[in-house]
Image: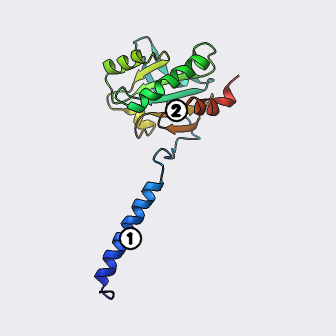
C-alpha cells in the first residue's frame, strides 16, 4: 500500500485540501487589498435619493470625502448607520470639514428612502444605476464598504464592513481642525 502511487496521490490531495482550508480560516475576509488605494477615486455623478440635486465627485475636490456603499437589506449597514450619521453631524453638517456620501447598491429607491428615513440619515444619499456601474468602478465585494478620499481626490484607505467612530476619527485625523 505504501509503495502505490495511488495511495500517495490520494494522501497528497487530502493534505493539499486541508492546507487550503487552514489558509482560508486564517485569512480575514475584511482585509482584501484594493488596487484603488493610492489612486484617484473613480469619477461618478449621481442624483440625490431625495431628488434634490445631483453630485459629481469631482465637485468635492478640496474636501475630504467619506464614500460609503450600503443597502437597505444589509444588517451591518443598520449597525453603522448611527455611527455615520453622528460623524456627519460632528464634521459635516455644521463644520463642513468632511463630506459624507452614501451610495445604495442593489436596492430600490423606495427601500433605500425608507432605510434613510428610519435611521435619520441626513447626508447626501444616492442610488447606484441599474447596472451597478459605480460599485463596479470601485470594485465593491459587498456592503458595507467605505472609501476614504483625501482633498485632492486620492483614495487613502478602504474599509470593508461596518465602520466605527474610532476608525473614522483615526483615518480623518490629519484633515480635522
Identify the residue under disc 2.
Answer: 163
Residue 74 numbered mark, or none: none
Which comes sooner in the sequence, label 2 or label 1? 1
Task: Determine the residue positioned at 61% across, 12% down.
Answer: 94
In which quadrant of the rendered image does the C terminus lie?
top right
Most extreme residue toward the top, as rendered?
Answer: 52
Give the crowd class for mark 1: few <14, some 14-19, many >=20 residues within 10 Å: few
- Where, quadrant-wise, is the N terminus in this rendering? bottom left
Query: Label 2 vs label 1: CA separation?
Result: 38 Å
Residue 151 relative to residue 109: left or right: right
Residue 21 lies, in percent from the top left, at: 39, 60
Q: Pointers 2 and 1 in contact (CB under 8 A)?
A: no
Name the residue rendered at 39%, 16% in the picture: 118
Is 76 above or below relative to 21? above
Is 93 drawn above or below residue 8 in the view shown?
above
What SS does tag 2 mark?
loop
Q: Position of residue 65 (x, y in %)?
A: 57, 26
In the depicted view, which residue is nearer to us: 89 or 127? 89
The residue shown at (47%, 55%) is: 26
Q: Quadrant of residue 60?
A: top right
Spot occupied by residue 22 in the image (x, y as percentages of width and height): 43, 60
- Residue position marked by numbered label 1 in the rendering: 15
Amino acid at each position: 500500500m505504501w509503495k502505490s502511487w495511488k495511495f500517495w496521490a490520494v494522501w497528497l490531495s487530502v493534505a493539499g485540501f486541508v492546507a487550503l482550508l487552514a489558509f482560508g480560516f486564517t485569512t480575514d475576509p475584511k482585509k482584501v487589498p484594493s488596487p484603488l488605494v493610492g489612486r484617484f477615486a473613480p469619477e461618478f455623478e449621481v442624483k440625490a435619493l431625495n431628488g434634490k440635486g445631483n453630485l459629481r465627485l469631482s465637485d468635492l475636490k478640496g474636501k475630504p470625502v467619506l464614500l460609503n456603499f450600503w443597502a437597505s437589506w444589509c444588517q451591518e449597514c443598520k449597525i453603522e448607520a448611527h455611527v455615520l450619521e453622528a460623524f456627519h453631524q460632528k464634521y459635516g453638517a455644521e463644520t463642513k470639514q468632511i463630506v459624507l456620501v452614501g451610495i445604495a447598491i442593489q436596492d430600490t429607491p423606495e427601500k433605500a428612502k425608507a432605510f434613510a428615513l428610519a435611521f435619520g440619515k441626513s447626508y447626501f444619499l444616492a442610488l447606484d444605476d441599474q447596472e451597478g456601474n459605480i460599485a463596479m468602478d470601485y470594485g465593491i465585494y459587498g456592503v458595507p464598504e467605505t472609501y476614504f478620499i483625501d482633498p485632492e481626490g486620492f483614495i487613502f484607505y478602504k474599509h470593508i464592513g461596518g465602520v466605527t467612530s474610532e476608525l473614522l476619527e483615526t483615518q480623518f485625523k490629519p484633515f480635522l481642525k
